C-alpha cells in the first residue's frame, strides 16, 4: 500500500474513532442489550441501505489507488456516512475486524449459473441433483484456516490502524443455516416444489444429507476453535444487533462454542408453502441445527404470520422473528406478543419508488408501533432490502428521522 493510500485510510480511521467516542454510542449500546433481553423501553431503529450503497457511495467517491486500499476505504466511508446521516440506533465502536484467511469446500456438487448481461440482473442455473443417486455425491463441507497468512494479515492491519482502533481476528462463516435455499440450488427450485408432492422421499433425503453435512461442518469449526462470539456489535439474523448478556452460555471457558452464539435460520423459498409442509420438509431439518445455539433468530423476507405458532412451539430459545413487509402485522403481533422480538421490516418500496411520500412512511411506522404496543411486543424497525433509493440518498436520512420521531414519540 502506497503512502498516499495509507494516509487516507488512517484519516478515516481517526474519524471512526472520534465517532465511536460520542456519548450516545454507549446509550445506544445499552438500548440493544435491553432489546435483546426483552426489556426494551422503546422501539429501536436501524437503517441498512444495502444495495443502495452503490448510489450513496459510487465507485468514483473513493480516492485510494490500490484495490486493497479501496476496499478498506469503502468500509470506513460506509460506517462514517451512516453515523453522520442516519439518526438511528446503530452503534459505532472502535472494533476493527480482520477475517481469517481460509479455504472452504462446498458440497462437492455445484449448480452451473447463467447470468444476465445486465448489472444486478437475474440468473438461472442448472441444478446438479437429477436423481436420488446424485444425493450420494454430496460431500461434507470443510474449512481450513491458513494460520500464517492470517497472522500476516493481522499484523498488516495492526500496523495500518492498530494505534487508532482495536484490531483483532474474528471469524463469521455463515449468514443463514436454513438449508432449503442450498437444496433449491442443488435440486432446482421448480423441481423442489414438485418433489414435495411427487417425490417427497427424495426431498427428505436431500435435506437430511444437507443437515448432516452442515452439523458436521459446524462441529468441525467448533473443534478447531474457529468460532467467534457474536454478542456485541454483530449484525444478527436478518436484522438487529447482537448485544446480549445471555451469551456466552454457562460453562464458557474462553473458546467460543456454538452454544455461545446467536443462530439463524430462514426459509424464504417456502414463503407460499403452508405450515404443514414447511414443518415436514424444512423445519424438522433446521431444528437439530438451531438446538446447538444459545439464542436463535428466524425468518427474513418470507411472511411468517401463519407459521408463528409452529415456530414459537418448536424453535429452541427463539429470541428474534422477522416480520416481513408482506406479513399480516396485526396477526403477527397477536401471536408473538412478547415471546420474541418483533423484528419488523418496513416495505422498501416506500424508499425505492419514483416519488417519496414521507406521510406514507409515517403512517406505516405509526400503525406498526401502535399495533405492537397494544400487544405488548418488543419491536425493532429494520429498513433493509433497499436496492435503490432512486438516486436520492437523502431519502434514507428522512426515513430514519421519521422512524425515530415515531419511535420516541
Image: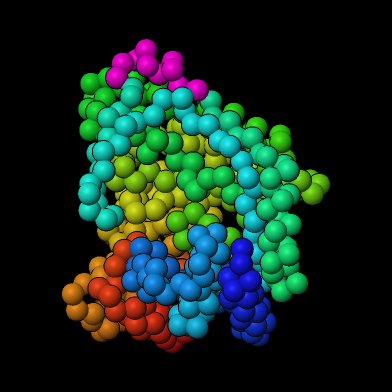
How far across and how far down the image is residue 27, in percent? 63, 80
What residue occupies the far top of the structure in this picture? 133
How far across and how far down the image is residue 366, in percent? 34, 79
Q: Is residue 171 visible?
A: yes
Res 109 quadrant in image: top left
How far across and how far down the image is residue 154, in percent? 71, 55
Q: Main secondary structure of the magenta part?
A: helix
Which residue is found at the position 46% from the left and 72% from the top?
62
Q: Nearer the viewer, residue 199 or 397?
A: 397
Bounds of the magenta segment: 130-139
Instruction: Report if residue 137 lies within the magenta region.
Output: yes
Please, is residue 246 above or below residue 392 in the view? above
Relative to 13, 158 lies left or right: right
How far across and how far down the image is residue 60, in percent? 39, 72
Q: Nearer the viewer, residue 136 or 268?
A: 136
Instruction: Report if residue 110 lies within the magenta region.
Output: no
Which residue is found at the position 53% from the left and 45% from the top?
174
Quarter of the figure that contains the C terminus: bottom left
Please, is residue 374 above or below residue 289 in the view? below
Which residue is found at the position 27% from the left and 56% from the top?
119
Amino acid at each position: 500500500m502506497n503512502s498516499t493510500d495509507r494516509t487516507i485510510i488512517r484519516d478515516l480511521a481517526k474519524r471512526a474513532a472520534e465517532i465511536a467516542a460520542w456519548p450516545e454510542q454507549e446509550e445506544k449500546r445499552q438500548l440493544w442489550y435491553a432489546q435483546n433481553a426483552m426489556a426494551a423501553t422503546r422501539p429501536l431503529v436501524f437503517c441498512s441501505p444495502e444495495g443502495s450503497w452503490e448510489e450513496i457511495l459510487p465507485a468514483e467517491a473513493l480516492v485510494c489507488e490500490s484495490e486493497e486500499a479501496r476496499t478498506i476505504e469503502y468500509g470506513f466511508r460506509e460506517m462514517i456516512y451512516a453515523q453522520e446521516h442516519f439518526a438511528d440506533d446503530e452503534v459505532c465502536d472502535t472494533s476493527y475486524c480482520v477475517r481469517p484467511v481460509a479455504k472452504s469446500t462446498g458440497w462437492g456438487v455445484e449448480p452451473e449459473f447463467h447470468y444476465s448481461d445486465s448489472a444486478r440482473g437475474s440468473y438461472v442455473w442448472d441444478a446438479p441433483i437429477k436423481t436420488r443417486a446424485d444425493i450420494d455425491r454430496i460431500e461434507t463441507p470443510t474449512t481450513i484456516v491458513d494460520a500464517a497468512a492470517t497472522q500476516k494479515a493481522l499484523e498488516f492491519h495492526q500496523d495500518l490502524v492498530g494505534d487508532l482502533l482495536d484490531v483483532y481476528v474474528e471469524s463469521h462463516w455463515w449468514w443463514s443455516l436454513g438449508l432449503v435455499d442450498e437444496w433449491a440450488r442443488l435440486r432446482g427450485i421448480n423441481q423442489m416444489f414438485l418433489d414435495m408432492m411427487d417425490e417427497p422421499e427424495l426431498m427428505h433425503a436431500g435435506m437430511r444429507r444437507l443437515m448432516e453435512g452442515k452439523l458436521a461442518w459446524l462441529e468441525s469449526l467448533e473443534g478447531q476453535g474457529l468460532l467467534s462470539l457474536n454478542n456485541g456489535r454483530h449484525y444478527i439474523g436478518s436484522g438487529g444487533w447482537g448485544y446480549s448478556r445471555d451469551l456466552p452460555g454457562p460453562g464458557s471457558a474462553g473458546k467460543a462454542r456454538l452454544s455461545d452464539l446467536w443462530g439463524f435460520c430462514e426459509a424464504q423459498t417456502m414463503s407460499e408453502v403452508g405450515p404443514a409442509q414447511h414443518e415436514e420438509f424444512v423445519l424438522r431439518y433446521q431444528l437439530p441445527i438451531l438446538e446447538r445455539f444459545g439464542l436463535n433468530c428466524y425468518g427474513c423476507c418470507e411472511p411468517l404470520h401463519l407459521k408463528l405458532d409452529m415456530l414459537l412451539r418448536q424453535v429452541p430459545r427463539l429470541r428474534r422473528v422477522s416480520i416481513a413487509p408482506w406479513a399480516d402485522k396485526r396477526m403477527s403481533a397477536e401471536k408473538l406478543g412478547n415471546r420474541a422480538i418483533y423484528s419488523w421490516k418496513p416495505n422498501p418500496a416506500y424508499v425505492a419508488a419514483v416519488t417519496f411520500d414521507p406521510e406514507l412512511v409515517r403512517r406505516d411506522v405509526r400503525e406498526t408501533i401502535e399495533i405492537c404496543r397494544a400487544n405488548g411486543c418488543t419491536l425493532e424497525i429494520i429498513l433493509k432490502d433497499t436496492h435503490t433509493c432512486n438516486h436520492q440518498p437523502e431519502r434514507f436520512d428522512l426515513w430514519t428521522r421519521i422512524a425515530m420521531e415515531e419511535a420516541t414519540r
